[in-house]
């Protein structure tokens, strides 16, 4: 099989042909040079090339090529890795599909609030019927929360003795929301974590870890200094996972539920010769103690709990009940 690429006359940058082999080689090389978790995940990318190159032939259809390329990307086991064509976007679902579905919003809305809760942007909030505990359910970090929204929510819950931030099934979104919300629970600058960038095409070409910070909200805003539980499950992913990685080290915070879904890599986007978009993790984000967060954040010691499905049928969320107990014991 010949390598279907040419070199530009001015720069040593490969240009791959728009045919099955050229698109395959472009994709494999892109991951080889820019993906940041090959070693951490134990992926033998050369072996992957050998196995999948055998499936490429010059007369295969675009759909057949897409399926082979998507299957190859699934070897990375990364929910941040996608290949997008006009008819489909590939997505690795096993980061959450092999785990129980332990969240049902209807149970909380009906049996804990009798549908009498407040809602602003992507947040449902109110005071739970037991223990004088406030509740914030945030469904997606893709739903922006303004500073005024946070003031209103925390002001309404200010008489509560504790607060539950429920981010189960929160698939992430805007990292700016992590800073904005976490800034209401700190009084001075904190080290949020570290970022490690790719510095070259070699698989071990990485920068030293660069520290990044989160700052308190500006003076005059509403802050929360009382105990907090962050409620998580496997479908807490990406920016939501990052939020947990930051909150876990605050002294007044407990992480309750199940290990999060991870997804800590900052995405890199590019394009194949055929025009298909490619997105994958290229920058690793570590927590404040330098731990990799790609594989998820565990609950605080003694705070791992699952949803009892039989109890859920009777209107009880055993994970939420456990979180209330943590704040009232």
Image (cartoon, rainbow, N blue to C red):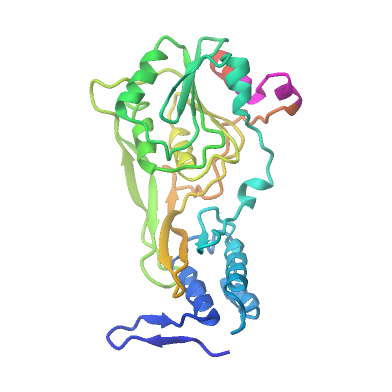
Q: Which residues are magenta?
A: 310-322
Residue 297's spot in the image, x, y percent? Answer: 54, 41
Q: Which quadrant is home to the C terminus?
A: top right
Comparing 200 with 86, the one in front is 86
Q: Residue furthest right?
A: 310
Is the residue 252 above or below the residue 158 in the image?
A: below
Task: Look at 49% across and 86% down and name the residue there.
Answer: 4
Q: Is residue 281 visible?
A: yes
Task: State left or right for residue 243 relative to residue 189.
Answer: right
Q: Is residue 248 magenta?
A: no
Task: Look at 42% across and 17% down and name the residue there.
Answer: 226
Q: How many marks?
A: 0
Q: Report which quarter residue 304 is drawn in.
A: top right
Residue 228's spot in the image, x, y percent? Answer: 47, 23
Q: Is residue 203 visible?
A: no
Task: State left or right for residue 220 relative to residue 238.
Answer: left
Comparing 274 with 212, the one in front is 274
Is the residue 49 above or below the residue 121 in the image?
A: below
Task: Look at 63% across and 23% down and name the residue there.
Answer: 107
Q: Report which quarter residue 76 is drawn in.
A: bottom right
Comparing 274 with 225, the one in front is 274
């Amino acid at each position: 099989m010949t390598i279907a690429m040419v070199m530009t006359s001015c720069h040593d940058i490969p240009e791959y042909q728009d045919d099955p082999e050229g698109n395959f080689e472009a994709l494999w090389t892109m991951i080889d040079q820019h993906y940041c978790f090959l070693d951490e995940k134990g992926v033998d990318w050369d072996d992957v090339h050998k196995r999948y190159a055998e499936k490429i032939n010059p007369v295969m259809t675009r759909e057949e090529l897409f399926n082979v390329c998507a299957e190859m990307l699934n070897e990375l086991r990364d929910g941040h890795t996608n290949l997008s064509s006009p008819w489909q976007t590939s997505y690795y679902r096993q980061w959450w599909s092999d785990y129980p579905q332990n969240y049902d919003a209807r149970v909380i809305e009906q049996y804990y609030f009798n549908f009498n809760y407040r809602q602003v942007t992507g947040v449902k909030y109110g005071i739970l019927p037991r223990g004088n505990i406030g509740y914030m359910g945030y469904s997606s970090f893709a739903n922006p929360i303004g500073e005024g929204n946070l003031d209103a929510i925390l002001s309404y819950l200010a008489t509560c003795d504790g607060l539950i931030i429920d981010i189960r099934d929160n698939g992430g979104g805007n990292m700016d929301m992590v800073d904005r919300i976490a800034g209401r629970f700190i009084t001075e600058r904190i080290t949020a974590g570290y970022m490690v960038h790719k510095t070259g095409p070699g698989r071990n070409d990485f920068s030293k870890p660069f520290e990044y910070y989160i700052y308190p909200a500006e003076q005059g805003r509403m802050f929360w200094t009382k105990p907090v539980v962050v409620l998580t499950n496997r479908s807490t992913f990406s920016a939501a996972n990052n939020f947990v990685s930051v909150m876990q080290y605050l002294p007044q915070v407990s992480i309750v539920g199940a290990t999060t879904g991870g997804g800590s890599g900052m995405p890199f986007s590019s394009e194949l010769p055929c025009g298909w978009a490619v997105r994958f993790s290229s920058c690793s984000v570590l927590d404040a103690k330098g731990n990799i967060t790609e594989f998820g954040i565990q609950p605080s010691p003694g705070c791992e709990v699952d949803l009892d499905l039989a109890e859920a049928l009777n209107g009880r969320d055993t994970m939420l009940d456990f979180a209330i107990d943590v704040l009232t014991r």
